[in-house]
Image (cartoon, helix red, strand yellow):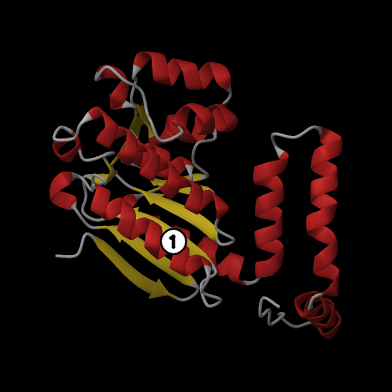
Amino acid sequence: MADLLCERKGGALVLTLNRPQAMNALSSELAAQLQAAVEAASDDHGVRAIVVTGAGDRAFCAGMDLKQRSTLTPDQKWVQSRAGWHLYQSLMNSPKAVIAAIGGWCLGGGFELALACDLRYAAADARFGWPEMTLGAYPGGGAAVMLPRLVGRARAKELFFTARRIDADEALGMGLVQRVVPRAQLMDCVLEVVRAIESTSPLGLAAVKRSVNEGTDLTMDEAAALDQRLRRPLEATRDYEEGIRAHFEKRKPAFKGE
């Protein structure tokens, strides 16, 4: 049985972590497969969005595979943690919209996987937390960097310091997820978002994603300069011409990413 399932649904590439017997925990092998799939999708003009989800009813992803991790030396654990960070970077740096469809447990490295996505939609049964904090460490894949940027320092510290688990509604209130829906409606909800994305410019999406991601950590003047550097080239593209033409012809634009 393949650990990662890849399925095209319209403009979406749905990547399903397929280790339900292990609560979709990330082994080194699964993480490498996921990164390769994300990198391939990032270069595929037919893919408008990457959707990451988990198989089965119990978990989106329970984090790193602790059974495998318990067999590693400290140096090997460090290498594995760095590989996890590189995976999350590939999601954040992808020019595509990356969406997490979260049902059940979303813990540790799985929580970091969700944080690395651009958008997160949760089933009502989703639960989030950091079990590493009860195991003598803390999340090693960048959570201490990513989480405060989403929920603020104090909220991030409270979740880290206490290892408290939160439900989907609390995650929504914190801004961790965009929407909470019944489990049966989760994928339909995400694919509806993808259809909206498909109506927009792929070049524009890639540029504004970079502007938001990189500009947040710059001064206002630096961020504005970056924003202008990313925005100006779009006006010389065929997609921009097509968008203007479609506006006046009162039809949907046919963007080609060029």
Look at 53% across and 44% down and name the residue there: 178
Q: Quadrant of residue 234?
A: bottom right
Q: Position of residue 179 (x, y in %)?
A: 49, 45
Front in this rendered view, residue 31 or 104: 31
Query: On the image, numbered disc 1 is attached to which residue?
Result: 38
Front in this rendered view, residue 93 or 183: 93
Q: Quadrant of residue 40?
A: bottom left
Q: As displayed, is residue 57 above or below residue 193? A: above
Q: Is residue 185 visible?
A: no
Secondary structure of the residue carrying numbered label 1: helix
Q: How many neighbours does mark 1 have within 10 angstroms: few (below 14), some (14-19), or many (20 or more)?
A: many
Look at 23% across and 44% down and name the residue there: 25
Look at 34% across and 20% down and name the residue there: 164
Q: Quadrant of the N terminus?
A: bottom left
Q: Position of residue 98 (x, y in %)?
A: 50, 56
The three-letter code of the residue at mark 1 reads: Val
Q: Quadrant of the C terminus?
A: bottom right
Q: Is residue 84 visible?
A: yes
Look at 85% across and 74% down and name the residue there: 236
Q: Position of residue 130 (x, y in %)?
A: 34, 27
Q: Position of residue 246 (x, y in %)?
A: 79, 81
Which residue is the extreme one toward the bottom? 249
* Left or right: 124, with 19 as reference point: right
Front in this rendered view, residue 148 or 34: 34
